[in-house]
Amino acid sequence: GRDREAADMLWETLPESQRDQVEAVAMDMWRAFESSTKAYARNADIVYDRFHVSKHLNEAVDDVRRKENKALQRLDDKTLAGTRQLWLFTPKNMPSDLRRELNELKSLGLDTGRAWAIKEALRKFWDYEYVGSARKYFEWWYGWAVRSRLKPIVKKAKMLKRHLDGLLNFV
């Protein structure tokens, strides 16, 4: 389950002596998991993983794309039609023909391209080895994201800022 009760039941399968030895717990940013972990594994750092962060940012990019696609289609412009998957790929994992198509779309100055660039820029955060440097990079990224005026991106950036300690625990 995805509620506090389910998380508590999981923790209760471990003896308290083992729970006290847990150093870190990787999880998504679900409040029920966080509060249960804080109650049962008092010494553990909470670590938010890149998979869930990426999932949230991909959702934001797709929200921007859908809104922009609707606006373009009202003008009989099908530029973004059928491009959903392009914006979700990691560029290095893309076949070269799709990479060319993505590069062409990015060059059009669309909101979706800006949202994608903001999402991709956060990938560098995971490469930092020092918390101070990672924090500084995040603050730069956050500033860009919230100034973008792309509501789904701003919303996700603010959510990540609220969970910054758990993101920095990854480092």
Image (spheres, rainbow, N blue to C red):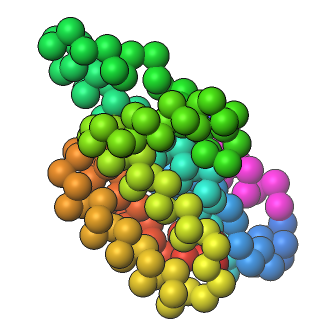
Q: Residue at x 58, y 37 (%)?
A: 99
Decide whether the magenta segment is chiefly helix, strand or loop: helix
Residue 163 image point, x, y percent: 44, 66
Left or right of 17, for residue 41 = left
Residue 20 image point, x, y percent: 76, 78
Task: Please say whether residue 39 is visible from this viewpoint.
Answer: no
- Compared with 24, 106 (above or below) is above
Image quarter in which the N terminus is found: top right
- Compared with 25, 112 (above or below) is above
Q: Which residues are magenta?
A: 5-14
Image quarter in which the C terminus is found: bottom right
Left or right of 119, for residue 7 = right
Q: Residue at x 54, y 27 (%)?
A: 85
Residue 65 image point, x, y percent: 34, 30
Task: Please say whether residue 137 is visible from this viewpoint.
Answer: yes
- Out of 79 and 153, give the one closest to the viewer: 79
Q: Does the magenta segment cover residue 147? A: no
- Out of 134 and 75, give the one closest to the viewer: 75
Left or right of 162, for residue 92 = right
Left or right of 124, for residue 155 = left
- Compared with 167, 73 (above or below) is above
Q: How many marks?
A: 0
Quarter of the image holding residue 13?
bottom right
Q: Does the magenta segment cover residue 10? A: yes
- Compared with 112, 32 (above or below) is below
Q: Residue at x 31, y 14 (%)?
A: 78
- Out of 26 and 135, give the one closest to the viewer: 135
Quarter of the image holding residue 21?
bottom right
